[in-house]
């Protein structure tokens, strides 16, 4: 029978409730069975008390958007240039890769994710190879098989192959398998609708990159460098009529924006776009450091929050970011939206991400009944307000340790 273990620390950060100074988390087996002080937990039975010292205990972090297989491109793609230069460089390097490269990237990306305190991860995959690795590291995760295609002549055969792969994998319990439509500029309207419909038969979320760059918006107007690049690479045929709408309005007109849609990036958006996403109750995932590296701008964090949208965080890939640290994404959010309270930013990297990935009942906060995936971060703060600011602004500089884990 599993013994109850009491994890004590200077601070316990449930996330869904205020921090507790000098509190404890009671864990039995893999589950949290209580939080509080020694007196609060005395009815839970005897067990060892482990004092972790001057640290804050947090729920494991949530990375709601990354591309593990692209970890093999770390430092091979030049960032800090404009989006189109990066995109051309990415496509050039992708043409050189094989399955061995992707497997190497996945293993490397998983190691970096775990070292950075991630306990729940959503991987966007073109190969599906990460499915075999995720179960070795995480108790729960999601693989979104990504669809790309804009040529109506090849669409039937492409979609049948995608459907066959998805149907073979969709009943996988861990990791769960869903679908992603890459973006409005790489997925035709017909394929977007097909992928959305198919996604309802597996993990019930559709991930899509939305409004990442001005080039994407120009493409939907029938002009610009992405439009020229796709013609150059013969990625599409000539029967598509530019909708002359913003990416958000375009997807909404196609019926893609629903509560089951995870919109990633959301940088180049208007007030009307924000209102539309809020009305549709779609989920939001921001990747601020990738946006900075690719010089596409910063998401309007304050406006999204004022519209009532919950924000999750993602790192994107090592092809467009320096590492896979969710804590660094939190610090980046504070940098571009200094008026947002640190407590809200911590939610972005924990419970909001879990909710966005339909895992809120299992992970994302330190609450009774949830999985005991916990991390610790050294802290020196003497008040709850200063504590959260320290974690958000300085947490990524400190040593993250896993609690209650054998790995």
Image (cartoon, rainbow, N blue to C red):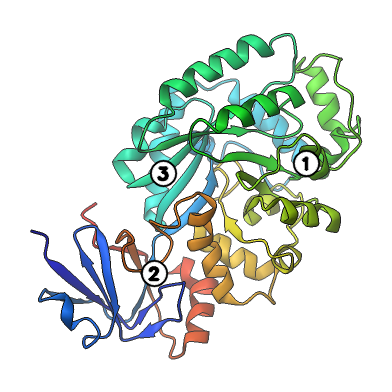
Q: Nearer the viewer, residue 165 or 193?
A: 193
| Residue found at x 39% / y 30% | 171
Residue 17 lies left or right of residue 224; in this view the side is left
Position of residue 272 measured from the top left corner of the image (x, y, whole percent) = 85, 55
Q: Tag 2 or tag 1, which sits nearer the N-term?
A: 2
Viewport quadrant of the N terminus: bottom left
Given contact means CB atoms under 8 Å apart, are the residues at marks 1 and 2 in contact? no
Residue bearing the label numbered 2: 58
Q: Secondary structure at mark 3?
A: strand
Residue 9 lies left or right of residue 211; in this view the side is left
The residue mark sitting in front, 1 or 3, is 1
Residue 325 visible from this viewpoint: no
Q: Secondary structure at mark 2?
A: strand
Position of residue 320 measured from the top left corner of the image (x, y, whole percent) = 61, 44
| Residue found at x 32% / y 68% | 368
Q: Tag 3 or tag 1, which sits nearer the N-term?
A: 3
Within 10 Å of disc 2 (Cα), the crowding (few <14, some 14-19, many 20+) is: many
Residue bearing the label numbered 1: 252
Residue 260 lies left or right of residue 224; in this view the side is left
- Residue 26 location, quadrant: bottom left
Residue 190 visible from this viewpoint: yes
| Residue found at x 45% / y 77% | 17
Residue bearing the label numbered 3: 141
Residue 141 lies left or right of residue 403; in this view the side is right
- Residue 212 location, quadrant: top right
Position of residue 270 measured from the top left corner of the image (x, y, whole percent) = 84, 55
Within 10 Å of disc 3 (Cα), the crowding (few <14, some 14-19, many 20+) is: many
Position of residue 350 measured from the top left corner of the image (x, y, whole percent) = 48, 62
| Residue found at x 35% / y 31% | 132
């Amino acid at each position: 029978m599993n013994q109850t273990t009491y994890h004590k620390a200077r601070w316990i950060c449930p996330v869904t409730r205020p921090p507790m100074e000098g509190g404890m988390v009671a864990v039995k087996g893999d589950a949290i069975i209580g939080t509080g002080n020694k007196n609060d937990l005395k009815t839970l039975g005897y067990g060892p008390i482990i004092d972790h010292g001057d640290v804050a205990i947090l729920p494991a972090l949530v990375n709601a958007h990354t591309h593990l297989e692209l970890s093999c491109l770390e430092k091979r793609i030049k960032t800090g240039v404009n989006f189109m230069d990066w995109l051309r460089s990415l496509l050039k390097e992708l043409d050189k890769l094989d399955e061995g490269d992707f497997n190497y990237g996945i293993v490397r990306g998983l190691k970096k994710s775990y070292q950075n305190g991630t306990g729940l991860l959503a991987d966007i995959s073109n190969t599906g190879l990460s499915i075999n690795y995720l179960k070795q590291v995480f108790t729960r995760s999601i693989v979104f098989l990504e669809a790309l295609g804009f040529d109506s002549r090849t669409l039937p055969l492409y979609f049948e192959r995608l459907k066959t792969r998805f149907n073979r994998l969709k009943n996988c319990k861990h990791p769960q398998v869903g679908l992603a439509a890459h973006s409005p500029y790489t997925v035709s309207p017909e394929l977007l609708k097909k992928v959305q419909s198919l996604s309802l038969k597996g993990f019930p979320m559709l991930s899509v990159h939305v409004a990442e760059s001005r080039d994407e918006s120009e493409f939907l107007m029938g002009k610009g460098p992405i439009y020229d690049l796709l013609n150059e690479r013969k990625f599409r045929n000539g029967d598509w009529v530019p909708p002359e709408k913003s990416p958000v309005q375009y997807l909404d007109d196609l019926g893609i924006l629903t509560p089951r849609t995870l919109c990633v990036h959301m940088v180049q958006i208007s007030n009307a776009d924000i209102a539309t996403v809020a009305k549709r109750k779609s989920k939001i995932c921001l990747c601020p450091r990738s946006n900075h590296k690719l010089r596409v701008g910063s998401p309007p964090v304050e406006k999204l929050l004022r519209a009532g949208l919950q924000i999750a965080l993602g790192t994107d890939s090592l092809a467009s970011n320096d590492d896979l640290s969710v804590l660094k994404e939190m610090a980046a959010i504070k940098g571009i939206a200094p008026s947002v309270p640190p407590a809200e930013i911590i939610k972005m990297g924990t419970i909001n991400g879990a909710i966005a990935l339909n895992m809120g009942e299992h992970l994302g906060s330190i609450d009774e009944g949830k999985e005991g995936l916990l991390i610790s971060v050294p802290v020196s703060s003497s008040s709850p307000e200063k504590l959260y600011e320290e974690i958000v602004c300085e947490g990524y500089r400190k040593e993250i340790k896993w609690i209650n884990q054998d790995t």
